Amino acid sequence: MLTPAFELSQDSEFLTVAIRIPHARASEFDVYFEGVDFKFYAKPYFLRLTLPGRIVENGSEQGTYDADKGIFTIRLPKETPGQHFEGLNMLTALLAPRKSRSAKPLVEEIGASGVSEEGADDEDSEFDWEIEQTPYEEVSESALLSQCHYGFGNLRAGVVQRLQDELSEVIDIKDPDFTPATERRQKRLAAELAKFDSDHYLADFFEDEAVEQILKYSPWWNDAHAEMMASLGKSQEKGDDAALVSFSEEEKYQLRKFVNKSYLLDKTAHRQVYYSLVDILLAYCYEIRVTEGEHNVESAWTIRKLSPTLCWFETWTDVHEILVSFGRRVLCYPLYRHFKLVMKAYRDTIKILQLGKSAVLKCLLDVHKIFQENDPAFILNDLYISDYCVWIQKAKSKKLAALAEAMKAVSLSKAQLGLELQELEAAALLVQEEETAEKAAQCNPMQPAPGSSPETSDSDSTTSSDTEDSASEQEELVGMQPSLLTSLQVPLLEEDSSALLIKESGLCRNVAGQECEVSQGQTRAPLIEEVGDELRTMLQISTPPDVSAGSHSGMQDGEERGQVPHD
């Protein structure tokens, strides 16, 4: 028998079942429905559903057949008009036999009564997401080895040992069958520190054009979440998540292919399932955003690499450590390593959880498809994703809502990642400022150095240059022979109307007995050249033999007073 493609919908009065039966004889079919049971048979198709609500046969039921499309549509009246049936898009759960919903496995009835498919806690009780503390107990090495489990709900063991060659390319942990959870975490943290590349991180931090473009992308859950919030604002009640999230024909086919299972999860395992779900969703949200919804050959690698649950078989104790681990791996492994992407994936995951199990299931189906098309990543489907796709259909939406609230209550900062990101950014910004200042100085050499006054820098440099020229000129005059100075002194002293003054600021003329101030920054080259011309002219006059020492002494006195007569 073949299970046909089918789809369920509802209104306030009727439940509608649309069954696609191509190449079947419409005149030869049987339909049976009573309570929550529905059966349909049209050779070679057989469909049996366990409905989430009760239906009744009261004469208002209807059935039509579209020969062109091969779709048989049956409208069944609800036993309680106005009742809302939840989970109509959970096809795997609908296909499960009725006894699997109510009957308990015999091992559970004989064993611990606290173990159930949905966990030890009551479904209607409040779920506490805080860390459960237990006293430390010393355990032997043999006991540790026997506790090395992994997979969905930590229900698997010994799988990697049988598939070592295939799984070595998928997971990072070596020999997980004999590696306790604490040792797995230590090795994971050490591997992340060794992989972290500060240059790659800083390159994405400063050149973030591509990252900003990625952040603008709007995945499908944004529109669904906005619609849900709008409906909440009007009715103050959460609407049906099935109406907000729809499944494609390919996704419905995936759901029909899954085998329904019952999971015996104790309280700890039940909590681990929810925590690992968050870890997988975070990695998936990052992948969807960086590829803008278009998967590529690296998609399977990205999801499993960013999820310690998938590549290290990690277990968790609270939501915050999941966020820290995800943030570290985003900054260590993928192409785009930016803290904004970490926070964006964090907010996307909250939206998905708030949308309910239909949205979560849609994400898990996409992950399942990505892994199924990648060799050898499909092994992770057998260990985790397939079981998640079946289990989530029976999960309670209020548990997912409580998990979303627990995520909103925590915060994540760069300092908590343990990679010294703030120190790296501060040092890089300082180097960037220094390089910018050096480039500016090279482009404009006349620009004053930082800390100097632009108004006085030019004049100070000119004054300093003029002072050095004046000092060198005085040294030349003082160093001349006495005879030459004496021969120059007499004719120069005869002129009272002009004289040369040697000051600290340079040379100037004394006209009519008044000193001429030399402004700072004024060029004194013509005056120095005039003195040079006089010296060259007077060098042609021979020194008188009877030059007295007194004239030389007078010249020295004139120099001490700072005046040198000028012709």
Image: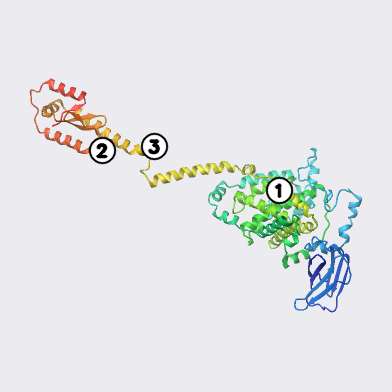
Callout 1 environment at 10 Å: few (<14), some (14 to 19), or many (20+)? many
Q: Which mark is residue 407?
A: 1
Q: Quadrant of residue 233?
A: bottom right
Q: Depth check: 198 or 79 in front?
A: 79
Query: Could you tell me how far apart the alpha carbons at marks 3 and 2 are, in whole angstroms?
Result: 22 Å
Report the number of discs.
3
Kindly indicate whether the residue at mark 2 contacts the one at mark 3 (C-beta within 8 angstroms). no
Query: Could you tell me how far apart the alpha carbons at marks 1 and 2 are, in whole angstroms?
Result: 74 Å
What type is the residue that disc 2 sits on? Gln
Q: Which mark is residue 111?
A: none
Q: Which mark is residue 522?
A: 2
Callout 2 environment at 10 Å: few (<14), some (14 to 19), or many (20+)? few
Q: Is any atom of residue 313 visible in this view? A: no
Helix, strand or loop status at disc 1: helix
Dot placed on the residue nearer the N-terminal end, 1 or 2: 1
| Residue highlighted by disc 3 | 452
What type is the residue that disc 1 sits on? Met
Kindly indicate whether the residue at mark 3 contacts the one at mark 1 (C-beta within 8 angstroms). no
Residue displayed at 27% across by 33% down = 468
Residue 17 location in percent, x, y?
81, 69
In the depicted structure, whether residue 151 falls above or below residue 529: below
Helix, strand or loop status at disc 2: loop
Query: Could you tell me how far apart the alpha carbons at marks 1 and 3 are, in whole angstroms?
Result: 54 Å
Residue 304 location in percent, x, y?
68, 54
Residue displayed at 74% across by 50% down = 403
Dot placed on the residue nearer the N-terminal end, 3 or 2: 3
What type is the residue that disc 3 sits on? Ser
Q: Quadrant of residue 167?
A: bottom right
Kindly indicate whether the residue at mark 2 contacts the one at mark 1 (C-beta within 8 angstroms). no
Residue 374 location in percent, x, y?
68, 61
